Image: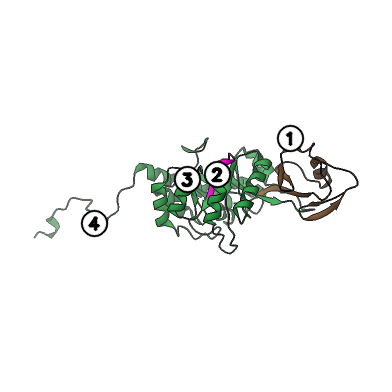
Chain colours: A brown, B green
Amino acid sequence: MTITVNGKLLDFAEHINVVSLLKYLKIKPTGVAVAINNQIIFKDDWLSASLNDNDNVDVFQVVAGG
Amino acid sequence: MLTIANKSFSSRLFTGTGKFRSAQTMSAAIQASKSELVTLAMKRVEHGRKADETLSELDRLHINLLPNTSGAVSAKEAVYAARLARAALDTPWIKLEIHPDQRYLLPDPVETLLAAEQLVKEGFVVLPYCSADPVLCRRLEEAGCAAVMPLAAPIGSNRGLLTKDFLHIIIEQASVPVVIDAGIGKPSEAMAVMEMGADAVLVNTAIATAHDPVNMAALFAQAVSTGRRAYEAGLAHSRLSSSASSPLTRFLNET
């Protein structure tokens, strides 16, 4: 299965969900937002939101700004 | 006491979190500023990049967070950024900013109004960064924005109150709080705009890039507070001709 995360192609042998994707990417969940194909996935749904082949995933985090 | 939407603030100085030398300096400066609302940005996570410490530092301060939509160049992108920010921080508060032009970062009024209308419908507390245009501020207010945030000068320019005459009109006409955002470079400018009756100011660059950001933050706090108190005390009218403060006796000229 191939998914695009923030513009980068990643291959996975098995189906994964948002929580396992963030673990794989070593991203702590605090201040993080995830969207699959531009649809925002709320934190409560991260475990149940599984990723499919060709999905486009955006992972954003809160950073310093004005 | 300043109230925006459902929140009350005892400080009328809001601060940004960008451009500080370190997250620790940012935190110390925010504490010195007594600010109760700070802005943040949203960014795509970069592979292998060290995690941003901003949020963990702010967590300790128990401060209100105002994420922005910086980077958005259209209403569509800004709405997406706002939804991401709400999911990331669990807050409906959003500083709406849309600036397609990278050189001057001036806000796009048409896209800003379109995005504001949509975000208000979705239940966001919208604080739009906008041009110092009284008509636009009216329209943003009518769209349901919780405040308006007209610019004093281009973002990060430290050029001060370039739009002063228009800020006067906006302050006179607005029935939502007016927060002067962008371009304020000195405490004296923050004080001047507070004397004019602005409800609050948002300062980032002038504090973050000062030689001593912590001290500068404290000085901005003083200036904002003094400016507000002067406004509340009711400034005396200015006039072109003189008005004697002492009785005009003629004895000095009498021989």
Q: Which of the pair B22/B6 is nearer the observer?
A: B6
Residue A29 locus on image (x, y percent): 75, 41
- Mark closest to the chain's N terminus, 2 or 4: 2
Circle 4: residue type: Ser
At horizontal 38% and vertical 48% (from top left) the residue drawn is: B172
Cα distance in 3D space between marks 3 and 1: 34 Å
State the residue position of label 1: A44
Q: Chain of mark 2?
A: B
Contact check, label 2 and label 4, Cβ < 8 Å: no
At horizontal 83% and vertical 45% (from top left) the residue drawn is: A52
SS class of the residue under badge 3?
Answer: helix
Give left or right: position of B58 versus A25.
left
Residue B107 locus on image (x, y percent): 54, 57
Residue A65 visible? The answer is no
State the residue position of label 2: B126
Residues flagged by tags 3 and 1 on a common chain:
no
Circle 3: residue type: Glu
Identity of the residue furthest to the left in this view: B255
State the residue position of label 4: B242
**Residue segment shown in magenta:** B120-128
State the residue position of label 3: B141
Residue B166 locus on image (x, y percent): 41, 55
Q: Chain of mark 1?
A: A
Residue B26 visible? The answer is yes
Cα distance in 3D space between marks 2 and 3: 10 Å
